[in-house]
Amino acid sequence: MNKLALSDKLTPLQLEHARRCISSAQSVAIITHQNPDGDAMGSSLAMRHFLSALGKQVTNIVPTSFPDFLAWLPGVEAVVQYEQNPEAAAQALRDADLVICTDIAEPGRVAALSDILAERFNAYESSQTARDNGETARNDGENADNASLLIIDHHLSSVCSNHPEQIAYPDSASASELVFRLVYQIVQDNRAVIEGISSQCRECFEPILDNTRDHHGTISLRHYNIDVPFDAILTPDFATCIYTGMMTDTGNFSYNSCEPEMYNIVAMLLTTGINKDAIYNRVFNAYTADRLRMIGYCLYHKMKVFPEYHTALITLNRREMYRFNAKSGDMEGIVNMPLQIKDVYYSVFMREDKIPPHQKPEAGEAKVKAKISFRSQGDRPVNILAREVFRGGGHMNASGGEFFGDVDEAAKKFIEVMPKYMRKE
Ligand code: 5GP
Ligand code: MN
């Protein structure tokens, strides 16, 4: 693989935390958010390829089903889907030496697995507090108390703002890019140490030299127990997963995509021989005729435009989705479409959703809920509205939330608060 310039975005503290977590774990559970999208699947499966190459026993868990247009991703056949296999998913999450969360930093975003993930987060918090108070970690980092947690995410989160060792960059366009950077920096760092050993004073490196081995491009740092076969990590499978996540979270590099180094990463991925045009086709040109008809219906019959507030709103109830045979993933991308209208800067899409069993107690009288997507352009945040009114959150220009009640009630609520959250100019 040809190397291009890539700055060290991840801090030494983050790198060290990731290394410690990975090296001391034998079994790893990788989990991502409910209704997983391309970045969720791409980042978590890329991590799988990396850890499998290190000889770890890896279980990928998704809380709910993933859409058909991602069902071809390398490694996807091994993913344990909670709804299909609740015991296996719960057990892996509970028992793994290490839990890695990609594209999420909140236990609440994993549907029915939220309680178990919250336990892992709490164990981690306690172990960190103990460490900060100078207490020796039980079993000296052996993770016997299931406290090992690694977050690789690009959402704003309180957990991560209190834990600078966790990898959380809200300015990053995708979690997949952060996975790439983590792997790249680990590999680069290992190489730097090896090169240091051969070019500098041997004695300085004597303490770790015994633990170090370098043969035919395979570089290992036994000190961290991480074997990093250089080109064996940056494989077409790994690159495909990373590229898919980067591509989907930037709308095929049409938003959040002005960061120059993003294209250095893309260039490095392409040197593995992956075909980016084929990936585009598999993801974006793989829908059913019904979905296209549903989009036509949404735009023609269901889209309301509020020119004064530069806002468009689309709602879909269960009957309408049934009519178009809508399946998981078919709703993806509809929310972005009204932004094609000149002078529309905010777009809201609401669809009726079932209230899952684990939410029943909170839902009170409501029989259904509305799942809501928000999008915006430029310096117009939608995550504040999502958080304050619709129990959600997300990025400045792409957020989501929910409302207990049907989509008409949710729309009424939105129209009520629109003047407060949508700018007129
Ligand atoms: P989407 O509209 O594609 O479902 O979600 C866009 C983004 O909004 C996601 O990447 C995620 O960051 C955020 N998001 C969506 N739904 C929720 C939710 O229910 N709660 C929170 N906290 N964030 C959400
Ligand atoms: Mn993402």
Image (tube, rainbow, N blue to C red):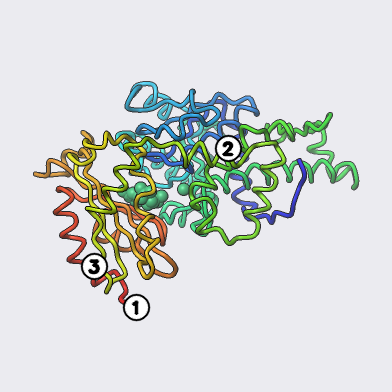
Q: Choose mark 2 or mark 3, whichever is in front.
A: 2
| Most foreground residue, 109 or 42 | 42
Q: Along the polypeptide, which appears first: circle 3 or circle 1?
A: 3
Rounded to the nearest angstrom, the CA distance separating label 2 from label 3 is: 40 Å
Instruction: Where is residue 215? Give x, y as percent.
Output: 83, 29
Residue lying farthest to the left in this orientation? 365
Q: Circle 1 sits on which residue?
A: 425
Decide if ligand 1 comes within 8 Å of the CB at mark 3: no
- Residue type at mark 3 is Met
- Residue type at mark 2 is Ala
Q: Choose mark 3 or mark 1, whichever is in front.
A: 1
Above or below, 263 against 58 in this view is: below
Decide if ligand 2 comes within 8 Å of the CB at mark 2: no
| Most foreground residue, 112 or 124 | 112
| Tags 3 and 1 touching, CB below 8 Å | no
Quadrant in which the C terminus appears: bottom left
Quadrant in which the N terminus appears: top right
- Residue type at mark 1 is Glu
Q: Circle 2 sits on which residue?
A: 278
Above or below, 213 against 253 in this view is: above
- Local crowd at mark 3 within 10 Å, few (<14), some, or many (≥20)? some
Instruction: Where is residue 79? Give x, y as percent.
Output: 46, 26
Side (left or right) of 165 relative to 275: left
